[in-house]
Amino acid sequence: MWVVLLQLKPGLSYYAKDPQAAANSLTSLLNKAESVVLLDLRSKTAVRVGATAGLRALGGEAFDKICNRLGNF
Protein backbone atom coordinates (compact mmCIF):
# COMPACT_ATOMS: atom_id res chain seq x y z
CA MET A 1 0.00 0.00 0.00
CA TRP A 2 1.23 3.45 -0.93
CA VAL A 3 0.40 6.66 0.91
CA VAL A 4 0.83 10.05 -0.69
CA LEU A 5 0.47 13.10 1.52
CA LEU A 6 -0.11 16.46 -0.09
CA GLN A 7 -0.56 19.77 1.65
CA LEU A 8 -2.02 23.06 0.52
CA LYS A 9 -1.32 26.54 1.81
CA PRO A 10 -3.28 28.53 2.62
CA GLY A 11 -5.41 25.94 4.34
CA LEU A 12 -9.15 25.46 4.15
CA SER A 13 -9.86 27.84 7.03
CA TYR A 14 -8.58 30.68 4.83
CA TYR A 15 -11.76 30.28 2.79
CA ALA A 16 -14.16 30.71 5.71
CA LYS A 17 -16.24 33.24 3.76
CA ASP A 18 -16.14 31.32 0.47
CA PRO A 19 -16.79 27.58 0.90
CA GLN A 20 -16.80 26.98 -2.85
CA ALA A 21 -13.29 28.43 -3.10
CA ALA A 22 -12.25 26.01 -0.35
CA ALA A 23 -13.51 23.09 -2.44
CA ASN A 24 -11.95 24.49 -5.60
CA SER A 25 -8.59 24.83 -3.84
CA LEU A 26 -8.39 21.04 -3.68
CA THR A 27 -8.35 20.68 -7.47
CA SER A 28 -4.57 21.03 -7.69
CA LEU A 29 -4.12 18.38 -4.99
CA LEU A 30 -6.46 15.98 -6.76
CA ASN A 31 -4.60 16.54 -10.02
CA LYS A 32 -1.31 15.68 -8.31
CA ALA A 33 -2.86 12.58 -6.75
CA GLU A 34 -4.17 11.45 -10.13
CA SER A 35 -0.67 11.72 -11.55
CA VAL A 36 0.59 9.00 -9.19
CA VAL A 37 -2.40 6.64 -9.12
CA LEU A 38 -2.76 4.24 -12.02
CA LEU A 39 -5.91 4.82 -14.04
CA ASP A 40 -7.37 1.38 -13.32
CA LEU A 41 -6.89 1.88 -9.56
CA ARG A 42 -8.43 5.35 -9.24
CA SER A 43 -11.96 4.09 -8.58
CA LYS A 44 -10.59 1.93 -5.76
CA THR A 45 -8.32 4.57 -4.23
CA ALA A 46 -9.38 6.36 -1.07
CA VAL A 47 -9.00 10.11 -0.82
CA ARG A 48 -8.97 11.68 2.60
CA VAL A 49 -9.06 15.36 3.41
CA GLY A 50 -7.49 16.36 6.67
CA ALA A 51 -7.65 19.70 8.37
CA THR A 52 -5.60 21.42 10.98
CA ALA A 53 -6.86 23.21 14.04
CA GLY A 54 -7.56 26.29 11.91
CA LEU A 55 -10.57 24.70 10.23
CA ARG A 56 -11.79 23.08 13.42
CA ALA A 57 -11.49 26.43 15.21
CA LEU A 58 -13.88 28.04 12.74
CA GLY A 59 -16.70 25.97 14.13
CA GLY A 60 -20.33 26.69 13.48
CA GLU A 61 -21.72 27.69 10.14
CA ALA A 62 -18.41 28.39 8.34
CA PHE A 63 -17.08 24.93 9.26
CA ASP A 64 -20.31 23.24 8.19
CA LYS A 65 -20.46 25.07 4.86
CA ILE A 66 -16.88 24.18 3.96
CA CYS A 67 -17.36 20.53 4.93
CA ASN A 68 -20.59 20.35 2.92
CA ARG A 69 -18.84 21.79 -0.16
CA LEU A 70 -16.02 19.30 0.20
CA GLY A 71 -18.56 16.49 0.39
CA ASN A 72 -20.03 17.62 -2.93
CA PHE A 73 -16.67 17.96 -4.63
Image: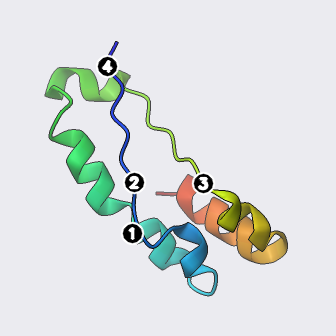
Q: Earlier in the sequence, mark 3 or mark 4?
A: 4
Which of labels 3 and 1 is toward the front?
3
Residue beneath disc 2: 7
Which residue lies under the disc numbered 4? Answer: 2
Instruction: Please name the residue that numbered disc 1 is placed on.
Output: 25
Q: Is residue 54 above or below residue 70?
A: below
Secondary-structure class at tag 1: loop
Q: Amino acid at mark 3?
A: Ala
Residue denoted by label 3: 51
Residue displayed at 22% across by 52% down = 31
Dot 3 surroundings within 10 Å: few (below 14), some, or many (20 or more)? few
Mark in the foreground, 1 or 4: 4
Between disc 2 and disc 1, the foreground one is 2
Tell me the SS state at disc 4. Answer: loop
- CA gap between label 3 and label 4 equals 21 Å
- Residue in front for this viewpoint, 49 or 42: 49
Residue at x 31%, y 54% (from the top left corner): 29
Q: Tell me: 40 left or right of 59.
A: left
**C-alpha separation, residue under disc 2 versus residue under disc 1:** 11 Å
Does dot 3 land on a helix, a strand or a loop? loop
In the rendered image, the residue lying farthest to the right is: 60
Q: How many marks?
A: 4
23 lies above or below 42: below
